[in-house]
Image: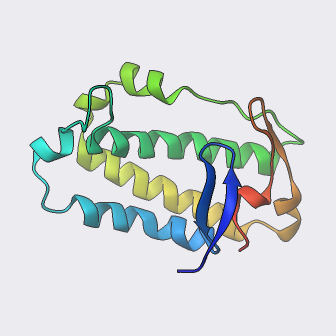
Amino acid sequence: MATRRVLCPWCGEVDRPKDLLAAAKRTPTLVQRVLRGLTNAELFQRPAYNDWSLHDIIAHLADAEIAFGFRIRMILAEESPVIQPFDETAWAGNLDYDHRNLRILLNSFRTLRAANVELLQISAEADWARVGRHPDFGPLTRELFGDT
C-alpha cells in the first residue's frame, strides 16, 4: 500500500495511505481479523496501568466513528462550522467501555464506517473544498481525508 508522510493534527507526523478512503473502508475487516481467536482475557488485558485494552480500543473506534460522521456532515452541510472536540478519556470512563458488548461495538463500527466512507465517496468535488474549524487544530480540509 502506497503511503506518504503527513502531519496529522491528532497524532503528529505519520505515514498515511495515499488512498485513505480505501484504507478506511478496509479497516473494519482488518480489525475483525486481528481479534479473531483472542480470548476475553486477551481482549481485556491492559499493557500497563491506565493503558487501553483491545476492547477499549474497539469501543473507542465505534464511538469515534460517530463523532467523525457528525463532523463530516457538519463540514458538508454547513458553512465553516466549528468542529466540536471530544475527550476520549472521559468517553472511555463515563461510557462504561469495560461493559460494552464487543459484537455490537464491531457491528456499529463497521456500519458507521461504511456510511461515512460512502458519504465521502459520493460527495461532489466542490464539497472537498469545504472547511471545518477545530478549536484546537484549526481548519480541517480535504487534506485530512487523503487524495482520493
Looking at the image, residue 61 sits to the left or right of residue 135; the answer is: left
The residue drawn where x is 74% and y is 31% is: 136
Q: Quadrant of residue 110?
A: bottom left
Q: Decide: is 42 above or below 125.
A: above
Q: Residue furthest bottom?
A: 1
Q: Quadrant of residue 84?
A: top right
Looking at the image, residue 54 sits to the left or right of residue 44; the answer is: right
Quadrant in which the C terminus is drawn: bottom right
Q: Which percent across, then down, holds residue 112?
A: 49, 53
The residue drawn where x is 58% and y is 80% is: 2
Residue in front for this viewpoint, 135 or 130: 135
Looking at the image, residue 27 sits to the left or right of residue 1; the answer is: left
Q: Which percent across, then down, holds residue 113?
A: 50, 57
Residue in front for this viewpoint, 79 or 140: 140
The residue drawn where x is 52% and y is 80% is: 1
Q: Which percent across, then down, holds residue 126?
A: 89, 65
The residue drawn where x is 79% and y is 51% is: 76
Visual colour scheme? rainbow
Q: Decide: is 46 above or below 49.
A: below
Looking at the image, residue 98 sits to the left or right of residue 114; the answer is: left
Badge count: 0
Q: Which percent across, then down, holds residue 78?
A: 84, 42
Q: Quadrant of residue 81?
A: top right
